[in-house]
Image: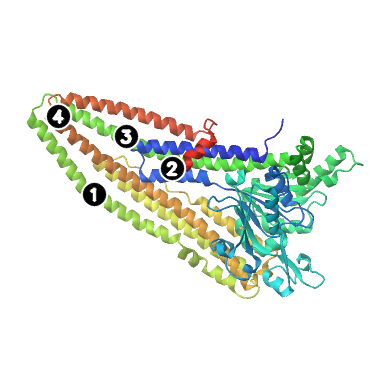
Amino acid sequence: MAVAGFNEQFDKHGAWRREVGLRLKVLADWLREQQLLDDGADESLQRLIEQLRSDKVMVAFVAEFSRGKSELINAVFFAGYGRRIMPASAGRTTMCPTELGYDADLPPCLRLLPIETRLQPQALLEWRMVPEQWTRVDLDVNDPEQLAGAMEKVSEVLHVTRDEARALGFWHDDRPEDNPPVNAAGAVEVPRWRHALINMAHPLLRQGLVVLDTPGLNAIGAEPELTVNLIPQAQAVVFILGADTGVTKSDLTIWREHLATMEDSAGTRFVVLNKIDTLWDELSTPAQIEAQMTRQCAETAQTLALDGDQVLALSAQKGLLAKVRGDAALLAQSRLPNFEYLLGQQVLGARQSTLESAIRAGVARVRSDANRTIGVRRRELSEQMLELKGLRGKNHQVIRQMRARVEQEKADFDRSAASVLAVRSVHLKLLRDVFKLLGSSSIKRELAVLSTALREPGLKLGIKKSYTKGFDNLRGVIRQVQLLERDIHSMLNTSFRQLNTEYGFSLQAAEPPSMERFEKDLDAVERSHLQYLGVGNMVQLARPEFAEKLVRALLARVRSIFETALGEIELWNKSTSSQLDAQLRERRRAYGRRIEAIQRIQDAAGGLDLRLGEISDQEAALDAVAERLQTMSHELMGTRAGAGLRAERADEILVA
């Protein structure tokens, strides 16, 4: 039976995201209609919808030159064009890191950052914010010839002096074997571009796929942000070797310096032994060829300390050719479908599980808040029912007295707002302390010693201790945030119990977001930096401009982690405040309904029975709302969504 290719699996993943996003939107609209959606719950659902809509899956391809990275990208993602899109022919190869993705706010284009920007201290992330510094080439996605021609720009080179190559980070006097080619005139060949961004509405890119094509060791090592930020954040890293050579010395260097520290996400690393067609020898039997490939895969797995199922052998060129020609036999022989299936199963399966966990947690919180509001309404209706039944047979004087009592209760409740404001004041004071801890000034302060050590001239032999100290400081900040979260949660629990006792609320302080994963993110950043510096880049680090780039890359990554943590805390705060606002609002509405009911009873003799009947109807309606909420949330919190909604319809509603 044919296995599902990566494209097909990604299409299914995209359809699932659109359907679940639509279900969340339907739930949010329905809760809003029922007046069960407070600001915090609304923002929580909108974030989930946006996460599903804009979720990205990055697959990074890493290898030494001429291992067939671009050909594999062509075979997996772009065979539908009927030709090569990424430059992969003889003499043409990707010379700069190239990202392929989709941004609806931009036209189809190729943007190129000149290599000379390496002489300036700004990190890549900062250059992305300066579009006028990039060279733009418009793309015609309906013209494969024009598209492929434009893509060839990523293989352009310049010829510079050795001093210029050294300043750009491509020439190393201490590692001559890693230096780029030198022509007859003594000029050094270097990439013309530092980074390339390709924006095109390819079906997979539209659904959130991002493909990162990296050049060889020389270019990777010279761009610290690529190694310590971009590649570690990819959901999958595909490391490509030659099937005929196995793990060479330069391959092993790339693995040890840039990929070996990714042990926490070992399931996302794949090693591909490409060009197995070079082993197809007419003098060897199929069994002998198979044994040779099996042996090469086993030796590679042992050398790189990987599980055997993470190493695959294939021929990207024959796979692309087979797809273009529609040759099923050649496609099977290329073994490309096995790689596509494994890539889809492990990468998309893990990503979908992560999204499902976020959806279950988010919907559970929203349902809990809505159920509390339904419970408040039920209690108010029960109290009204008892109150009104007590009026049977009573005269107008008693009814007037009851109205006066309810109005007095309402006035007392309105005056109690001071105690609510006091809770908020203490809450906000503690939150301000959290915001300071996770702000940019705090990051710079905690990393000040490390930043200074990195910027010092000369070799930095004690830099590992500075890294350890700096990251211990950052982990200390995260732990301080955890302590403050516990203080806030304890304060809210105490205050909510008091308010529940005094005013009959059903407030419940939600558990604060866990900071554990942010500590793990910091650990991963520290590992990637230490691995990067500890093997072969200490000499590079002696160059001030290189050290400055590394500092900026580090600050940008840590800032991103802290901002994510801050966003979760802000949402938790909003959810807690909104819960209090919702119950205050419900109580005020209840007082208004009670006074209105008594007024109607005063105005009409039959008003009491009529109002009692209305309350019974409202109780039945609340039961129906609670049942509907249960059904909708269970559907969303189930293991997998079905295919009951058409993807294009989901797109229309989400866009609207």
Identify the residue position indicated by label 1 in the image.
417
- Inspect this view and state whether residue 184 appears: yes
Residue 313 rendering spot, x and y as whole percentages: 77, 44
Say the numbered circle drawn on residue 375: 3
Q: CA–CA distance between discs 1 and 2?
A: 29 Å
Left or right for 87, reference 579? right
- Inspect this view and state whether residue 335 appears: no
* Callout 4 amino acid: Ile
Identify the residue position indicated by label 2 in the image.
45
Mark 4 or mark 1, whichever is nearer to me:
4
Q: Callout 3: few (<14), some (14-19), or many (20+) C-alpha neighbours within 10 Å?
A: some
In terms of secondary structure, where does tag 3 sit? helix
Quadrant in which the C terminus is drawn: top left
Q: CA–CA distance between discs 3 and 2?
A: 21 Å
- Name the residue rendered at 40%, 30% in the picture: 628
* Callout 2 amino acid: Leu
